[in-house]
C-alpha cells in the first residue's frame, strides 16, 4: 500500500542577510512526511534542521531571511504562498510546534492553564467551562502530576520536565495533523527524556498525527522515529529507515555522528570528534582496566583534597501570610571525599540536590549543617577575606556559558578579569600574554581576544568559559552540567579538552551531570544522588556494570543506547 503524503518539501532553499550579503543556508532540500509517521531530523547546530522546520510554519525571522526557491505542500496547499493572516488558521490548529526551551517559550506572567486555554479560545468554539475542562484533560493526558495545581501555577513554579509537558499539551490541544518537536528533550534528565519520548509515541498512536522530531542525538532518534533524515551544513546528506541508518550508514557524517557519543562499553583515551572522523584522524587508544587501576592506586594513596562531612542544606519557604513556614532539605547528610587528580562524577535527576551541593562546596550558597574540609581546613567557617583567597583554588564551569559571560566585555578582558582581581601578574601586558596563552590552550587563537561572546558558537563559548576558569590555576573545578546543551561532536571536543587540561595542570574535577554516559566516561568515582541523599558511591565502571540500587538501575536503563 502506498504511503500518503501529508507534507512535502520540494527543492527548498532559504537565505539569510548579513551585512547586505545574501547567504544561502538551506540548499535545495526535499523530503516527504507521511500520514501517521514519526520522521526524525538529526544534525548538529547550524545544520539547518530548525530553520527548515520554522519555514513550514512561516516563522522565519522577517527582514533578515527569505525562502529563495522551492515549495512546502501541506494538504495540497503551498505554505510558502500564504500571508501571515492565513497562517493563523493553520498554526496551532493543523500544524503545531513544541519548542526547544520551554522556559523561554512559555509566558512567565501567565499561569500554565491560561496559556493552554488561549489556543483553545483561538481555534475552537467551546465555552469557558468546556475550555477549562479540556485543559485539565490535556494535562492528565500528558501525565502532569496534580493537573489542578499545574493549571494555576506559573512556569517558574514547576520543573523543566513539567514545563515541557505543558508545551506538549498546548501543541496537541487542537489535535493537529502535524506536530513539529524541536529538540524537545535537550538538557532534560534521561528519565524525564524517556518519559517525554514515551508520551509523544503514545499520543501519536492515539491520534494518528504525523510528527517531525528534531534532535542532534542519533541514539535518541532510534527510540522514537520510523524514518530519519540527516542534515549537514544545509543539505540532507542521507535519509532512510532507522535500522538502515544505524546498521549501515552511508554518509561519513552519519557514521561520525554515531561514533561521537561516549561508548558505555569501551573507554577511549580521546573521544572521536566529527572533524577527526571525517579527516580519518581517529585515535583508537583504549584505557584498559589495568591502566585505570594503576592510576587509581596513585590517586587514592594520598590524603583527600576535599572532604564533605554530613552536609545539609535546608530551605525555609512561607507559602502564605497565615501559613506555617515549611522546610525542605535539598541536601540531606551527604558525605564523600575527593582526591587530587580525580574526577568525581555527581549524577541524579533534576531536584536531587547535586547543583545545591556544588554551590555549597563553592561557598556560593552556605550549607546549613556539616563540614567541608579543603586541604584539611573547614571552609564553612572562613571570613570574607579568607573566602576571596579560596576562590582562586576552587572554581566553576557553568552550564550556560553565554549567560555566565558579560556580553559587554570582550572575551580577552573577561579572562583577564579574575587575574587582576587576584593580582596574579604585575602588569596588564603580563595578564594579556597569559590570556593569549590560555586561549590557545583551549583551541582558540589570539585573534579572538577582542571579540564579544555573541560572536561565538556554543562550543566556542564553552571553551571561553573554561579558559576563564583555568586562568587562576585552581586546584578544584566544579563542572556544573558544562556539556549538557552542546552538540555531540562539540561535547566530545570539550570533554577531550577537560581531560587534556586535567593531565597537563593536575586539575581535580567534580563533574555534575544528568547524562550518565558522559559521567561514566569522565569519572573515576561516581556519586549518585536522589532526593538530597547519597544513593550510591563507587567506582564509575562498577556502578554502571552492577548497580546496587533500583534508582541507579532506572537511570542506567533510561540512557538512549541506539539500536
Image (cartoon, rainbow, N blue to C red):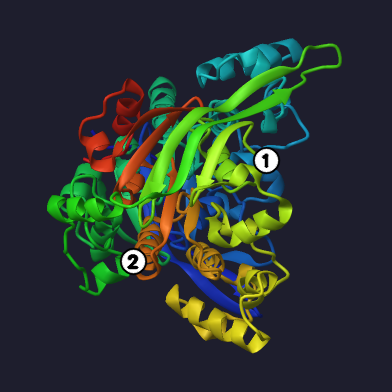
Residue 521 image point, x, y percent: 29, 50
Q: Secondary structure at mark 2?
A: helix
Upstream in sequence: badge 2 or badge 1 = 1
Placement of the C terminus among the 4 image quadrants:
top left
How many marks overall? 2
Q: Relative to 358, say whether 299 is above or below.
A: below
Disc 2 to disc 1: CB gap under 8 Å: no
Q: Which residue lies at the image location 65% right of the left edge and 84% below the top edge?
A: 426
Q: Which residue is mark 1?
A: 88
Q: Which residue lies at the image location 55% right of the left edge and 16% below the top edge?
A: 145
Q: Is residue 530 left or right of residue 430?
A: left
Q: Which residue is mark 2?
A: 503
Evaluate whether residue 32 shows in this view: no
180 or 497: nearer the viewer? 497
Q: Relative to 155, say whether 507 is above or below.
A: below
Residue 258 image point, x, y percent: 26, 54
Placement of the N terminus among the 4 image quadrants:
top left
Q: Is residue 530 left or right of residue 364?
A: left
Q: Is residue 241 left or right of residue 132?
A: left
Residue 152 image point, x, y percent: 72, 20
Crowd rating for badge 1 (residues with CA inside 10 Å; few <14, some 14–19, many 20+): some
Q: Nearer the viewer, mark 2 or mark 1?
A: 2
477 or 9: nearer the viewer? 477
Q: CA distance from mark 2 to mark 1?
A: 56 Å
Q: Relative to 243, say whether 483 is above or below.
A: below
> Which mark, residue 35?
none
Q: Which residue lies at the image location 68% right of the left edge and 32% below the top edge?
A: 155
Residue 341 image point, x, y percent: 36, 57
Q: Secondary structure at mark 1?
A: helix
Evaluate whether residue 288 shows in this view: yes
35 or 479: nearer the viewer? 479
29 or 339: nearer the viewer? 339
Amino acid at each position: 500500500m502506498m504511503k500518503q503524503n501529508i507534507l512535502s518539501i520540494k527543492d527548498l532553499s532559504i537565505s539569510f542577510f548579513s551585512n547586505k550579503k545574501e547567504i544561502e543556508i538551506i540548499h535545495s532540500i526535499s523530503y516527504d512526511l507521511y500520514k501517521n509517521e514519526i520522521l526524525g531530523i538529526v544534525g548538529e547546530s547550524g545544520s539547518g534542521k530548525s530553520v527548515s522546520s520554522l519555514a513550514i510554519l512561516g516563522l522565519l525571522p522577517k527582514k533578515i531571511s527569505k525562502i529563495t526557491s522551492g515549495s512546502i505542500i501541506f494538504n495540497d496547499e503551498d505554505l510558502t504562498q500564504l500571508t501571515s493572516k492565513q497562517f493563523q488558521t493553520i498554526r496551532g490548529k493543523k500544524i503545531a510546534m513544541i519548542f526547544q526551551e520551554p522556559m523561554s517559550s512559555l509566558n512567565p506572567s501567565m499561569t500554565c492553564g491560561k496559556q493552554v486555554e488561549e489556543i483553545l479560545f483561538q481555534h475552537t468554539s467551546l465555552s469557558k467551562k468546556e475550555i477549562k475542562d479540556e485543559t485539565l484533560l490535556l494535562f492528565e493526558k500528558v501525565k502532569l502530576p496534580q493537573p489542578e495545581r499545574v493549571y494555576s501555577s506559573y512556569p517558574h513554579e514547576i520543573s523543566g520536565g513539567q514545563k515541557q509537558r505543558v508545551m506538549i499539551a498546548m501543541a496537541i490541544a487542537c489535535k493537529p495533523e502535524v506536530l513539529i518537536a524541536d529538540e524537545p528533550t535537550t538538557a532534560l534528565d534521561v528519565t524525564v527524556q524517556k518519559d517525554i519520548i514515551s508520551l509523544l509515541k503514545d499520543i501519536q498512536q492515539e491520534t494518528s498525527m504525523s510528527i517531525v522530531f528534531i534532535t542532534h542525538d542519533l541514539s535518541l532518534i532510534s527510540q522514537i522515529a520510523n524514518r530519519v533524515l540527516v542534515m549537514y551544513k544545509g543539505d540532507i546528506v542521507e535519509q532512510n529507515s532507522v535500522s538502515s541508518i544505524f546498521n549501515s550508514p552511508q554518509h561519513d557524517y552519519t557514521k561520525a555522528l554515531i561514533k561521537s557519543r561516549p561508548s558505555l562499553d569501551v573507554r577511549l583515551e580521546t573521544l572521536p570528534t566529527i572533524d577527526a572522523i571525517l579527516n580519518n584522524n581517529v585515535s583508537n587508544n583504549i584505557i584498559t582496566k589495568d591502566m585505570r587501576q594503576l592510576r587509581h592506586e596513585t590517586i587514592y594513596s594520598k590524603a583527600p583534597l576535599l572532604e564533605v562531612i554530613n552536609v545539609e542544606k535546608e530551605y525555609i519557604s512561607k507559602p502564605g501570610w497565615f501559613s506555617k513556614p515549611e522546610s525542605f532539605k535539598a541536601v540531606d547528610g551527604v558525605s564523600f571525599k575527593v582526591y587530587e587528580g580525580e574526577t568525581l562524577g555527581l549524577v541524579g535527576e533534576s531536584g536531587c540536590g547535586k547543583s545545591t551541593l556544588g554551590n555549597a562546596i563553592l561557598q556560593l550558597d552556605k550549607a546549613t549543617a556539616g563540614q567541608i574540609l579543603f586541604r584539611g581546613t573547614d571552609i564553612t567557617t572562613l571570613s570574607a577575606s579568607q573566602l576571596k583567597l579560596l576562590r582562586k583554588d576552587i572554581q566553576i564551569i557553568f552550564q550556560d556559558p553565554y549567560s555566565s559571560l558579560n556580553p559587554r566585555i570582550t572575551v580577552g578582558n573577561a579572562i583577564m578579569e579574575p587575574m587582576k582581581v587576584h593580582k596574579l601578574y604585575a602588569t596588564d601586558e603580563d595578564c594579556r600574554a597569559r590570556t593569549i596563552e590560555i586561549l590557545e590552550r583551549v583551541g582558540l587563537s589570539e585573534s579572538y581576544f577582542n571579540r564579544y561572546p555573541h560572536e561565538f558558537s556554543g562550543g566556542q563559548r564553552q571553551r571561553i568559559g573554561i579558559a576563564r576558569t583555568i586562568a587562576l590555576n585552581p586546584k578544584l573545578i566544579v563542572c556544573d552540567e558544562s556539556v549538557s546543551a552542546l552538540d555531540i561532536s562539540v561535547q566530545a571536543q570539550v570533554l577531550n579538552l577537560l581531560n587534556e587540561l586535567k593531565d597537563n595542570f593536575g586539575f581535580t574535577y567534580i563533574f555534575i551531570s544528568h547524562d550518565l554516559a558522559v559521567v561514566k566516561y569522565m569519572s573515576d568515582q561516581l556519586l549518585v544522588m536522589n532526593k538530597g541523599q547519597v544513593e550510591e558511591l563507587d567506582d564509575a565502571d562498577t556502578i554502571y556494570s552492577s548497580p546496587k540500587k533500583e534508582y541507579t538501575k532506572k537511570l542506567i536503563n533510561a540512557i538512549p543506547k541506539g539500536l
